[in-house]
Amino acid sequence: DTAVSQTPKYLVTQMGNDKSIKCEQNLGHDTMYWYKQDSKKFLKIMFSYNNKELIINETVPNRFSPKSPDKAHLNLHINSLELGDSAVYFCASSQLITSGDEQYFGPGTRLTVT
Amino acid sequence: TQLLEQSPQFLSIQEGENLTVYCNSSSVFSSLQWYRQEPGEGPVLLVTVVTGGEVKKLKRLTFQFGDARKDSSLHITAAQTGDTGLYLCAGEWEYGNKLVFGAGTILRVKS
C-alpha cells in the first residue's frame, strides 16, 4: 500500500488555467505538507496543516490555496497558472507537528506550464 | 541566501571510492536530517541527528552532527552504483518549526 499518494503524477497545462493536485496519506498522521522542488532540485516548504488546521503558510502567492477536508487529505489548488509555477510538487506527512519528526513524501507531481 | 549550504553540488565517482558530502550553516538547528531522493520519487529519510557531536552509522553511511549543531556531514565508504541519487540535508529550524532543505548533492557512482 502506498503511504503517501498524489494525483496526477504529471500535469501539463497552459498559462492562466486553474488546476488541482490531490494528496492522500494512509499512515494515520496528523500533519501534512506541500513542498515545491524547482529545476535546481531545491526543495522548499509551501504549507503545513495539522489536523486540518493551517500551521505554516510560507509566503506563497494567493493563487495557491491548500484545502484539507480531513486529516488524511491535503489538496492544492492553483489559480491563474504562470510559467514560474512549473516545478515538482511534493506532498508529505508526519505524525508529529514538530518539523524534526520524520516526514514521508509522496512521489511528486511534475507540473509544466506552457 | 540559503540557510543550509550543501557541497559539493555534483559528485561523480567510481564504484569502491569513498566520499563525503557537507551541509553547513551559520544557524543552529534543533536537529538535522539526511534524505535520499531517486529520480521520479520523493525524498526518503536516511537518518536524523539531534545531539551536537552525534555520529550515526547506517551500513556504509556515516552521519555526523557538528558540536555546535550548525553543520553535518555524510560519509559513504566503498560507494556502490545503488548509492546514486540526490542527497538532501534538512535542518529543523528552531525559529519557524519547519524543515529547511539544502540545495542537494547529486551523486553518481559509476561501475
Image (tube, coloured by chain):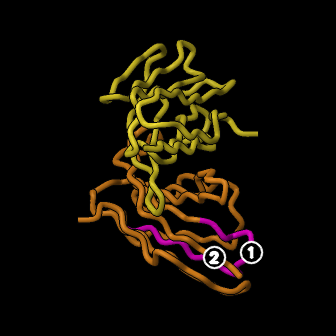
Circle 2 — which element? strand
Measured as percent of width and height from the top left, residue B110 is found at: 47, 44
> Which chain has been coloured yellow in this picture?
B
Q: Is residue A104 above or below residue B69?
A: below
* Numbered circle sitting on residue A112: 2
Q: Residue furthest front?
A: B111
Measured as percent of width and height from the top left, residue A103 is found at: 41, 48
- Residue corresponding to mark 1: A83
Q: Quadrant of the C terminus of chain B?
A: top left
For the record, the magenta segment spans: A72-87
Q: Nearer the viewer, residue A17 or B12?
A: B12
Residue A73 is covered by the magenta coloring = yes
Tell me the amino acid under the disc marked 2.
Thr
Measured as percent of width and height from the top left, residue B100 is found at: 59, 41
Q: Quadrant of the N terminus of chain B?
A: top right
Q: Earlier in the sequence, mark 1 or mark 2?
A: 1
| Chain under numbered label 1 | A
**Mark 2 Cα shell of 10 Å, populated few (<14), some (14-19), many (≥20):** some
Q: Is residue A2 above or below residue B49?
A: below
- Point 46% across, 29% down: residue: B17
> Which chain has been coloured orange in this picture?
A
- Point 69% across, 73% down: residue: A63
Q: CA distance from mark 1 to mark 2?
A: 8 Å
Q: Is residue B101 above or below residue B26?
A: below
Is residue B104 visible in the rendered structure shown here?
yes
- Point 27% across, 57% down: residue: A28
User: Contact (CB < 8 A) between labels 1 and 2?
Assistant: no
Count of numbered circles in the view: 2
Tell me the amino acid under the disc marked 1.
Leu
